[in-house]
Image: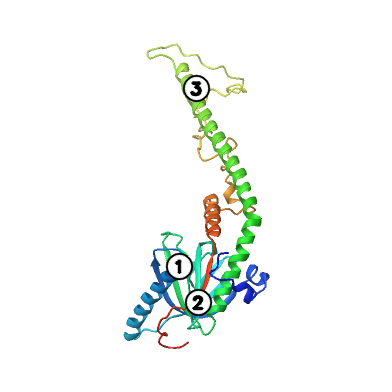
């Protein structure tokens, strides 16, 4: 993990790995908001973001709006920002997308981190005001990042290999289904050609009647006639039992196999790109800084 200075020598991690891996660490804070920044790292980058959001909050405060309170849930799966009352998730920042985390050493209340948005791919700077917990929250995010990276290194290779195997199987299944559909099409064309060949020419009066048994029934034949014929007793033949080929089913009438719906794998369709993205994010590392923002203290207290 990249650091401007090594805090780990001065202060050990504050939580057990199990607390961040199996559960989450909650914190309460005020959320000044987020704003787009041009770079994924840098003290000056977050300084400008804090100034911008602080100015916006001054305007909203003059209009009678208070800084909203949020609950932060930090785990190896990310940093969730929730409404403390309804528990609705407002933002879900995955750890491999967080590239910079800092707190203000002159004002113990302010901390911020930069996260790459999952939809727009823009870098957003999130700014918070916490009651003397800014440094602790920053260290907790750093510890969660460290644990998540180790877990990714342990399981990421296996996931990639599993994905490759599943991808190969799925590709082969698709090829077989395409081949099956083509064979069905050829069979249907052959049946149509045979039906045309059995139709007597126009104007022909010679019709060969089928022989019947003592009960005036057409004798049973193991070969199904290609052209439906009317029995001599005048009853119409039953409707054909063959249905048009269903392209969405295989040769045995089953739905095509989709490995992504298997409960054991539980892989999203874009898992390969997701793994590549996680690998890129973790390789970038998380820069943690304790910096002097040299900003005026925020108005209002928690």
How far, Cα to Cα, is label 1 from label 3?
71 Å
Q: Can you identify the residue that label 1 sits on?
A: 42
- Asked whether residue 208 is in view, the answer is yes
Q: Can you identify the residue that label 2 sits on?
A: 103
How far, Cα to Cα, is label 2 from label 1?
12 Å
Task: Tell us which disc is closer to us: 2 or 1.
Answer: 1
- Asked whether residue 229 is in view, the answer is no
Q: Vertically, is 34 above or below 235?
A: below
Q: Which residue lies furthest to the front in this view?
A: 5
Left or right, residue 29 beside residue 173: left
Nearer-the-camera pick, 219 or 49? 49
Circle 3: element type: helix
Circle 1: element type: loop
Q: Vertically, is 175 above or below 110?
A: above
Q: Can you identify the residue that label 3 sits on?
A: 190
How far, Cα to Cα, is label 3 from label 2?
76 Å
Are there few (<14), some (14-19), or many (20+) residues within 10 Å of tag 2? many
- Is the C-beta separation of discs 3 and 2 under 8 Å? no
Q: Where is residue 170 in the image (x, y as percent from the top left)?
A: 57, 41
**Tag on residue 236?**
none
Q: Who comes first in sequence, dot 3 or dot 2? A: 2
């Amino acid at each position: 993990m990249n650091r401007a200075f090594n805090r780990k020598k001065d202060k050990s991690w504050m939580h057990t790995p199990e607390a961040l891996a199996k559960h989450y660490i909650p914190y309460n804070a005020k959320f000044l908001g987020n704003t787009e920044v041009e770079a994924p790292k840098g003290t000056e980058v977050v300084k400008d973001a804090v100034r911008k959001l602080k100015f916006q909050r001054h305007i909203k405060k003059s209009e009678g709006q208070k800084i909203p309170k949020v609950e932060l849930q930090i785990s190896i799966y990310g940093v969730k920002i929730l409404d403390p009352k309804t528990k609705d998730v407002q933002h879900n920042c995955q750890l491999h997308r967080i590239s910079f985390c800092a707190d203000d050493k002159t004002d113990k209340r302010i901390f911020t981190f930069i996260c790459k948005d999952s939809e727009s791919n823009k870098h957003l700077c999130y700014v918070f005001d916490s009651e003397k917990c800014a440094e602790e929250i920053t260290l907790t995010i750093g510890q969660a990042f460290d644990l998540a990276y180790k877990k990714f290194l342990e399981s990421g290779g296996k996931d990639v290999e599993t994905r490759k195997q599943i991808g190969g199987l799925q590709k082969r299944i698709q090829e077989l289904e395409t081949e099956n559909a083509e064979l069905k099409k050829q069979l249907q064309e052959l049946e149509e050609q045979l039906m045309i060949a059995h139709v007597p020419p126009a104007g022909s009066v010679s019709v060969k009647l089928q022989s019947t048994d003592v009960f005036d029934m057409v004798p049973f034949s193991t070969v199904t006639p290609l052209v439906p014929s009317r029995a001599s007793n005048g009853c119409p033949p039953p409707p054909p039992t063959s249905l048009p080929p269903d392209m969405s089913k295989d040769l045995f009438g089953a739905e095509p196999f989709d490995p992504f719906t298997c409960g054991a794998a539980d892989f999203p369709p874009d898992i390969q790109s997701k793994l590549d993205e996680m690998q890129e994010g973790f390789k970038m590392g998380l820069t943690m800084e304790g910096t002097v923002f040299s900003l005026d203290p925020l108005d209002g207290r928690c």
